[in-house]
Image (cartoon, rainbow, N blue to C red):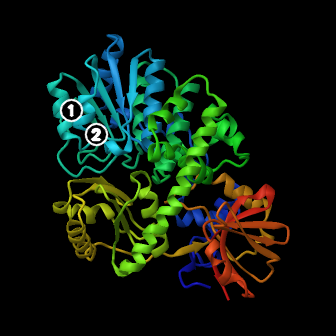
């Protein structure tokens, strides 16, 4: 077995709280090993476990007015609604920004607001800029940013000069002074008075809507559940921790998606024959489909589809086709990045920095693929100087800290521990100086070599229905609580084969069960003459006897 595959904890029987874990297992009617798994991840008392399995939006959402400047923002929005002012929502081009914009737009429409929205194209750059402010219609008197605005100082100054009030709602780290605006709502504020700091941009937008509901003394209705569902997509797609308030949002949003999905989501599930809806559905299906609009097309199209009353089947087909195009572009450009890494031996660096003719919209995905393959943080920079950075999951390495410490080489930058964006003067000399500076600053940043943990050794053919049901009841999973993986050590494979348009995936047959290993087709030759296959897997679609393989080792 690979040395970086380890059990998540000591055996249950040896645990100091063995009796407590068994008690919680019986109380919640879940397998003891899963109760142990939850206990290990901090869900270690009755109150936490009840909130984990049975969150309630009416009692478990924090009071929205605990967010700094929320009262000021709501008063200004209500004034705009009453006076029929023209309100512009300015969003971001990723899924979090798309869903945040949709939430606020739909809610303000329900409050009979005169509201419009605009999301910048990716080549226009992130956030509210001077260029975007210059395009704002003269009749707009209030702008509300969602998922951006914290560092838009020049644009906010121009807004003041034009007599436009701006409410900034954001969740990104604050690397400079606070924005000079009418109200600044961001749970990452240094003077934060809110009990939870890890909301997504869509989560912050949802809190604004919740505050408007409270101000209007309005019950949380079916419309609010749609906003919850959109916020769940934004939160999970933005890879925020599924704890505290995020768990309430994502659990309730996922439940709605399963029972009564948003018409757009329902049509996508129907088109792609999706029956099982869980956090994996969000991460590998819905998130990428909506992200593709912002990556290689126009994110305003996605907001239009999510907020219109009637949807054409052709619109859904176009969304899915756009994502397929994005996948092919990513595959081709990752090959180019790989060639550069090997040619320049960049895999020896602490942070892998590649620079070349990459598409702005997919550099984040390429950076993620590089980080995953080489287990090192990665930065991908286009020929125009736009860069995207990703850290290694589970390493504790803060990519934004390192980039911030190299700010002298950059035009602008922003982001958080796991992911960041930057802009740099793009010439070989400058890029090389930046690459060297990054290596030096990376030495002082914590990096723990990540390992993969599994729940227990269990042959895929012995995986039971009740264990699958228990895992489903624990949804949604996220970076703070990954979907439980199991270790299978077997020579009982009846066959394995390649599949996918480019034969990039592997499929294994275990008697009556199938297991898929995405993007591991290159291992086919290595596995061909091996007698024993070791895998880490999780249930994928148990009704069909399907599993997903996350790691493979052969001997």
Number of disc labels: 2
Residue 7: image tag: none
In the image, 463: left or right of 76? right
Of labels 1 and 2, earlier in sequence is 2
Q: Are marks 1 and 2 in contact (CB under 8 Å)?
A: yes
In front: label 1 or label 2: 2
Q: Is residue 244 above or below residue 21?
A: above
Residue 311: percent from left, percent from top: 61, 27
Horizontal relation, residue 271 to residue 262: left or right:
right
Examine the image and state in which quarter residue 130 appears: top left
- Measured along the vertical axis of the image, is residue 519 above or below residue 289? below
- Secondary structure beneath label 1: loop
Q: Which percent across, then down, holds residue 287?
A: 54, 47
Asked whether the viewer can see residue 334, the reply is yes
Residue identified by numbered label 2: 149
Whole-percent x and y of residue 156? 20, 34
- Quadrant placement of the C terminus: bottom right
Q: Residue at x 32, y 59 (%)?
A: 383
In the image, residue 57 above or below residue 287: above
Residue drawn 17% across the image and 31% down it? 158
Q: Which residue is mark 1?
A: 181
Between 78 and 155, which is closer to the camera in this rendering? 155
Residue at x-position 42% and y-position 51%? 361
Nearer-the-camera pick, 508 or 380: 380
Image x and y of residue 440, in percent: 23, 76
Quadrant of the frame with the N terminus? bottom right
* Label 2 crowd bin: few (<14), some (14–19), many (20+), radius 10 Å: many
Q: Distance of mark 1 from mark 2, alpha carbons? A: 10 Å
Q: Nearer the viewer, residue 3 or 49?
A: 3
Q: Is residue 191 above or below residue 140?
A: below
Judged from this view, the residue extending furthest toward the top is: 83
């Amino acid at each position: 077995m690979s040395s970086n595959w380890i059990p998540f904890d000591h055996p249950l029987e040896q645990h100091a709280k063995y009796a407590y874990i068994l008690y919680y297992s019986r109380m919640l009617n879940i397998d003891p090993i899963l109760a142990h798994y939850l206990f290990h991840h901090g869900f270690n008392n009755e109150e936490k476990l009840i909130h984990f399995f049975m969150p309630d939006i009416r009692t478990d959402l924090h009071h929205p007015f605990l967010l700094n400047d929320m009262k000021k923002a709501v008063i200004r929005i209500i004034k705009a609604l009453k006076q029929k002012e023209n309100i512009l929502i300015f969003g971001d081009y990723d899924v979090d920004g798309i869903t945040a914009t949709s939430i606020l737009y739909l809610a303000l429409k329900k409050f009979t607001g005169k509201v419009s929205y605009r999301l910048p194209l990716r080549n226009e750059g992130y956030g509210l800029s001077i260029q975007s402010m210059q395009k704002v219609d003269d009749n707009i008197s209030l702008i509300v940013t969602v998922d951006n605005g914290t560092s838009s100082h020049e644009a906010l100054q121009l807004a003041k000069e034009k007599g436009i009030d701006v409410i900034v709602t954001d969740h990104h780290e604050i690397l400079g002074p606070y924005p000079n605006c009418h109200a600044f709502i961001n749970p990452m504020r240094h003077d934060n008075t809110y009990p939870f700091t890890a909301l997504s941009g869509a989560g912050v937008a949802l809190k604004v809507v919740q505050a408007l509901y409270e101000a209007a003394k309005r019950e949380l209705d079916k419309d609010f559940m749609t906003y919850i569902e959109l916020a769940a997509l934004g939160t999970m797609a933005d890879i925020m921790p599924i704890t505290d308030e995020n768990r309430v949002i994502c659990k309730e949003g996922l439940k709605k998606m399963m029972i009564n999905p948003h018409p757009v989501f329902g049509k996508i599930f129907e088109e792609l024959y999706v029956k099982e809806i869980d956090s994996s559905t969000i991460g590998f299906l819905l998130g990428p489909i909506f992200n593709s609009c912002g990556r290689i097309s126009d994110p305003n199209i996605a907001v239009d589809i999510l907020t219109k009353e009637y949807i054409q089947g052709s619109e859904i087909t176009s969304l899915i086709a756009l994502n397929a195009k994005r996948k092919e572009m990513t595959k081709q450009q990752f090959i180019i990045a790989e060639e550069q890494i090997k040619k320049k031996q960049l895999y020896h660096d602490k942070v892998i920095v590649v620079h070349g003719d990459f598409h702005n919209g997919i550099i984040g995905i390429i950076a993620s693929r590089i980080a995953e393959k080489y287990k090192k943080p990665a930065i991908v920079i286009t020929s125009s100087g736009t860069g995207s950075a990703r850290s290694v999951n589970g390493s504790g390495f803060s990519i934004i800290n390192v980039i911030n410490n190299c700010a002298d080489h950059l035009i602008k930058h922003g982001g958080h521990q796991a992911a960041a964006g930057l802009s740099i003067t793009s010439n070989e000399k400058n890029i090389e100086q930046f690459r060297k500076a990054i290596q030096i600053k990376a030495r002082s940043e914590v990096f723990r070599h990540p390992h993969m943990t599994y729940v227990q050794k269990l042959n895929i053919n012995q995986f039971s229905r009740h264990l699958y049901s228990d895992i489903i009841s624990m949804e949604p999973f996220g970076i703070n609580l990954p979907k439980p993986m199991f270790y299978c050590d077997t020579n009982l494979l009846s066959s394995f084969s390649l599949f996918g348009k480019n034969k990039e995936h592997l499929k294994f047959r275990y008697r009556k069960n199938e297991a898929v290993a995405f993007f591991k087709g290159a291992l086919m030759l290595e596995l061909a003459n091996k007698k024993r296959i070791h895998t880490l897997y999780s249930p994928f679609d148990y009704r069909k006897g399907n599993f997903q393989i996350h790691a493979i080792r052969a001997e």
